Image (cartoon, coloured by chain):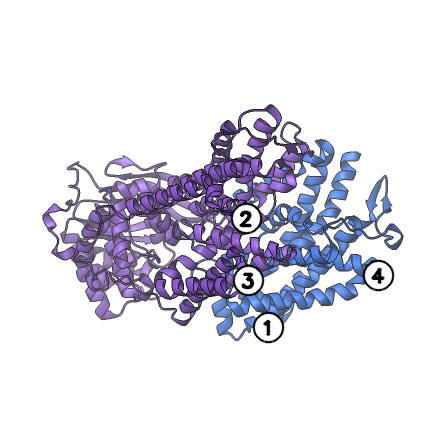
Chain colours: A blue, B purple
Amino acid sequence: MITLQAAVTGALVGGLYALMAAGLSATWGVLRVINLAHFGLILIGAYLTYQVATSWGLDPIATLLVSAPALFVAGALLQGAYDRLGVAGFNSLLMSFGLLIVIIQIATNIWTADFQRIAPELNRYATGGLPLGRLILPTPALIAFSFAVVLIGGGYIALQRTFVGRGMRAFAEDRNVAAAFGIDHRRLGLLLGGLSGVSAAVAGMVFALSNSITPTTPYEWFGTVFAVVILGGVGNLLGTLVAGVGIGVLSGLVSVIWSPSTEPFMLFLAVILALLLRPQGLFRTAGAQ
Amino acid sequence: MSALGPMGRGLLGLLGTAVVLAMLGIFSEDLGLSQYLLVLVATILFWTTQATSWNLLSGFAGYFSFGQGAYVAVGAYSTAVLTGRHGVNFLYSIPVGAALGGLLALLIGMVAFRLRGLRGEIFALLTLAVPFILAAYARITDWVDGGQGTTIPLPNYPEWIADFQHLMFLLNLAVATLAVGLALGVHRSRLGRGLAAIHDAEDAAEVLGVPTFRYKMMAIVLGGVLGGAGGAIFALQIGFVAVESVFNLTIPLFVIIMSVLGGRTHWLGPVIGATLIVTLQDRLAAGGLSAWSAIIFGGLLALLVVAASDGLYSRVRANPWPTLGAGVGVAAVVLVTGTVETVTALLYGMLAATAVAIGAGLLRPARASAASASDASTMDDEALPRPTPVPASEGPLVACEGVSRYFGGVRALEDVSLTVDRGEIVGLVGANGSGKTTLVNLLCGAMRPTRGTIRIGGRPTAGTAAHRIAHAGVARTYQIPKPFASMTVHDNVAMAVMFGRDNARLPVARRVAARHLATVGLSRLADAYPSTLNLHQRQLLEMARAIAADPTVLLLDEALAGLSPAEIDDAVTVIRSIHDSGISIVIVEHLLRVVRGLATRVVVLDHGSVIADGEPAAVLSDPAVVAAYLGRQRA
């Protein structure tokens, strides 16, 4: 029973991993930008939720009204800069590492290095849950999962059905051919960067609902999130969702069967397995550039 | 010119610098040098060790690591556990730290470099995860840390060392000298050449005979050893080792910035970077701007990627006098007119020099080509090693028996048997996707067959690395040329001589290379860089490099694709002369005119199977071949 509960909770928490990974995976897959600064955007999203909820007494989910547009602009500007400077692939990893450090230091200067958490009286989502038979679906995890399904599912449908989405897929397949057929990579990049900014806002909000925030928190996400991105297949949104849930179940089970402290090792193992089993999942396009 | 080579001069300069620094340190009180300066230089030396350790793999071979903190932490915890908890003399914990750092590097390398198709980005992400895993382990493991941290008592030291800071200075100096000396040795050796080739084009390096896996392992382990030794001393310096103090992203950030700023391809680069960054950080702290230093350094890294990714060393090298002049001038002016400290003046000098070096590079981005005119052709040709005589064994040079290769469900090759005999030119033809390039990849060892055996000179190649197959006498060219971009045309070919069957040293290899360049008609471009060559010239460079490996069999993979008719005729002449020198050739080609003219035998592949093998004229008029090649409608 405890095991089943852990698996279900883990699956729901996996929604948060998927949310964090989705934006990263999309810009990596389509624009060839490995944007470590995305973790910084998630951090800023979490802090914005904390700040707006605390200062204005707004419902934590409603803080998205502030953080989503702000991070849309930030994400778009970031992609615009990468595109303008012609930074992609390995250089983007390096450059965004520098930017991540900058963002974390700015967050430290504003919010200090102490742990910050939304006060319980302002946050009605932190506790409680939805009973399902003898199982309980914890509210924050349920929220994470619902947002992940809506956002990632919506993104997937948009990619399949809309004109812009087809453009992005074409661009991911072969950027030169796509450009030759009149796809404007600059606008596409701005839009995709902005949308991944929005996903960062949502991921940050969900994280802030049930966790304390400190500027160095993003480092703890690295392992899990990259495992999700790679397992799911770079640029593959539905894959990200599946991988996120899978890893959530894995860490949930590991924490009850062994102990929570073994979790990082299992995740590290997951990364290595991801690399061993799915190296071809990286960069689906091959051949001439 | 002195009798010493560049390596000897470098080592002499390094040792001289180290001795002078040691003397200045030991007698600093008598010379009136401040303790503050001693600590600053010790910090520079610590970071020089770390940046150099990082640079061995990540700079020379191009596999960027975000995991430098892991080596520092392993070293630091060696001191914490041995010296801090069990009272072992620190002189023992430093080598233990070095050994454990090396061991960790070995493990990382064993996992990472065994992965097929490992990309630089994936290696970087993998190394990013390592320190966090180790941190989690340290936090929950009581005999290592357990979350409380460890205090390290002040170490004992001999009387001739004035105080603790002097001890730290001397220890850091010793390890930094060792690190830079090693980097210099690597840079000037076969290992360094091989790592540079891996950096430029790893696949091509492997099939030319560079043992890429072994070289990468050597670089990563050396880096781990140095990082661990530096970390063990770092623990003494900080006096209290806790998870937060040794596992943080400052270490990878700093070593990456230092090496990128200084220059990754030269051993001196990290030294320059460490000096500049540590001084800058020190001045920022003195100016009360500590909270901004991470922002400044993070921003600097982002900026460097865009503006000067090749680093200061090569920029200074290109404009030594203006740079030096600006540096010394500004430092002197600030020192004379201002009321600032000496270190601040020095920093201004360094920043001015940096600005001039980067600015000059931006204004004049064209690469100054190496001017040393090669007089290799006038050298005594008789002194050069002759091609290794082909062992007069019986039987075919290359033999495939029932070879199949599947990619997932795709059957690229199915039950292929063929031989290549001495003196032949085998034309390998077939429609696109018929498996020609896969066959070439199998023959040169870049891929392994799913089933079947391949024999080179009678010996089965199962489980043999591609560079060993190169040594057995198989060389290849790539349809899309893969030159070593950081080396001249001449050195591209010399690389192949060095790592081919002759195992020649660089000066000899350069002379042999000149002969091969003459064979393909590229002598006048010997000092050019590959980026300035056109496709035809790059293909000729591919051929020169391949024959420089001294093969018995040369695999030409669509070496004529995309060439103009005149260029094709030229290339055909070159191929003939290569064949006349005694090398058997397998040529993959679509142009039947060329195949008919050159080949002594033709093998036709269709959907992964051999459908014809024999005399060119007979095979090419075979109705089945015509059907497979031209399409069934026209047959």
Q: Secondary structure at mark 4?
A: helix
Spatial distance from mark 2 to mark 4, Cα to Cα? 37 Å
* Chain on which label 2 sits: B
Query: Residue shown at 54%/73% (left/top)?
Result: A183
Query: Residue shown at 69%/47% (left/top)?
Result: A245
Pick the residue in front: B220 or B398.
B220
| Residue B315 % position (x, y) | 39, 62
Spatial distance from mark 4 to mark 3, Cα to Cα? 47 Å
Q: Amino acid at mark 2?
A: Pro
Of badges 3 and 2, the one in the foreground is: 3
Number of callouts:
4
Q: Residue furthest right?
A: A121
Labelled pair 4, 3 in contact (Cβ < 8 Å): no
Disc 2 with disc 4 on a shared chain: no
Of badges 4 and 3, the one in the foreground is: 3
Q: Secondary structure at mark 2?
A: helix
Rendered-image quadrant of the C terminus of chain B: bottom left
Name the residue beneath numbered marker 1.
A187
| Residue B55 % position (x, y) | 44, 48
Query: Residue shown at 44%/50% (left/top)?
Result: B271
Can you say whether A266 is above or below A102 in the image?
A: above
* Chain on which label 4 sits: A
Labelled pair 4, 1 in contact (Cβ < 8 Å): no
Name the residue beneath numbered marker 4.
A55
Name the residue beneath numbered marker 2.
B252
Pick the residue in front: B91 or B581.
B91
Name the disc covering residue B339, or none: 3
Disc 4 with disc 3 on a shared chain: no
Labelled pair 2, 4 in contact (Cβ < 8 Å): no
Q: Tell me the crowding category of disc 4: few under 14, some 14 to 19, or many 20 or more residues within 10 angstroms, Cα based.
A: few
